[in-house]
Amino acid sequence: MTTNHQIRLARRPVGLPTADDWTSTEAEVPEPGPGEFVVAVSHLSIDPAMRVWMNPGASYVPPVEIGAVMRAGATGEVTASRHPGFAVGDHVYGNFGVQEYALSDGEGVDRLDLSLAPAHTYLGALGIAGLTAYFGLLDVARIKPGEVVVVSGAAGAVGSVVGQIARIHGCRVIGIAGGPEKCRTIVEEFGCDVAIDYKSENLRDALRKHAPDGVDVYFDNVGGKTLDSVLTRLARGARIVICGSMSQYNATERPPGPANYMALLAARASMTGMVVFDYEDRYPQASAELAGWLKDGRLRSREHIAEGGVRAFPETLLKLFSGENTGKLILALGNG
């Protein structure tokens, strides 16, 4: 009998998650009932938002319950089906969780076209990361050719796509990343015009140098001091997109709010939070455009694929917060 290995949330973390926050369990591989199918999970999306989902209280989605399989977007192959819309052999994406096999009724599940890209790319540029960048820039920020766009976390899953979409639309792109290797990558591979190394440079001074007339759009993935610094360099009518606040996800005390928020008033600027799920009805249109850019070479999808199967999930998640990944962090489970 095949065993389904799973990772469940054992307790609410304080600070960085530790091994004691997880339980490794085994279960029988599920059998589909009428209108259901089973997926052998091949690749798990490892996302900073996972840390938020582990906290008590709802944010934009309910928290993962203690004892539940950890929530995760994933790709896989249908291995058994009693669902009219999904056949054995279909490659799919869905919220399948940190486990080797998932039972689904098809809600929120999409088929993948592997002729366009391998399955793991649907967790990167052709997945939620790419869609977040797409709608954040084009709908929330409303970028225009010639504008100066700054993106933090520019070597990460979302940030790397933000820089490329901004470049495709004729913007000047300044990427913020940590360390010389990531800064080199965001310029040479992801097309940023300028890279700022927040670990070795004064961010305000660097922005004054590289954006002397101010920042038109700031796509924020990290929050904290980085956001506060960019607030001091806004052009008139600037738009800030709040996508994430990775610098604060493991804080054990409530972090202070931005000290320089009155710069929004002086610059007649706006700061708007965005959640990609609000645009679900437009995913097909956006995905088609992203796929077109990928096919013609204007967009690159960089995936950092970790090995080790389900049991490697706790340590793989920590790679996000130590900055080990460049591009989209993914855990391969070995099912395909």
Image (cartoon, rainbow, N blue to C red):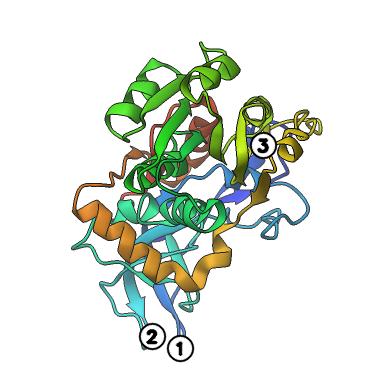
- Mark 2 = which residue? 82
SS for tag 2? loop
Give the amino acid type for the residue marked by disc 2 in the picture: Arg
| Residue 289 drawn at (x, y percent) | 32, 62
Q: Disc 3 or 2, which lies upstream in sequence?
A: 2
Q: Is residue 70 left or right of residue 225?
A: left
Q: In the rendering, which numbered label is found on residue 274?
A: none
Q: Mark 1 or 3, which is nearer the eye?
A: 3
| Quadrant position of the C terminus in the picture | bottom left
Q: CA distance from mark 2 to mark 1?
A: 5 Å
Residue depicted at x 45% and y 49%: 144
- Mark 3 = which residue? 249
SS for tag 3? loop
| Residue 121 drawn at (x, y percent) | 31, 52
Task: Tell which of 332 and 328 is nearer to you.
Answer: 328
Give the amino acid type for the residue marked by disc 3 in the picture: Tyr
Q: CA distance from mark 3 to mark 2?
A: 40 Å
Residue contact at pointers 2 and 1, CB within 8 angstroms: yes
| Residue 56 drawn at (x, y percent) | 77, 50
Q: Mark 3 or 2, which is nearer the eye?
A: 3
Q: Quadrant of residue 36?
A: bottom left
Q: Disc 2 or 1, which lies upstream in sequence?
A: 1
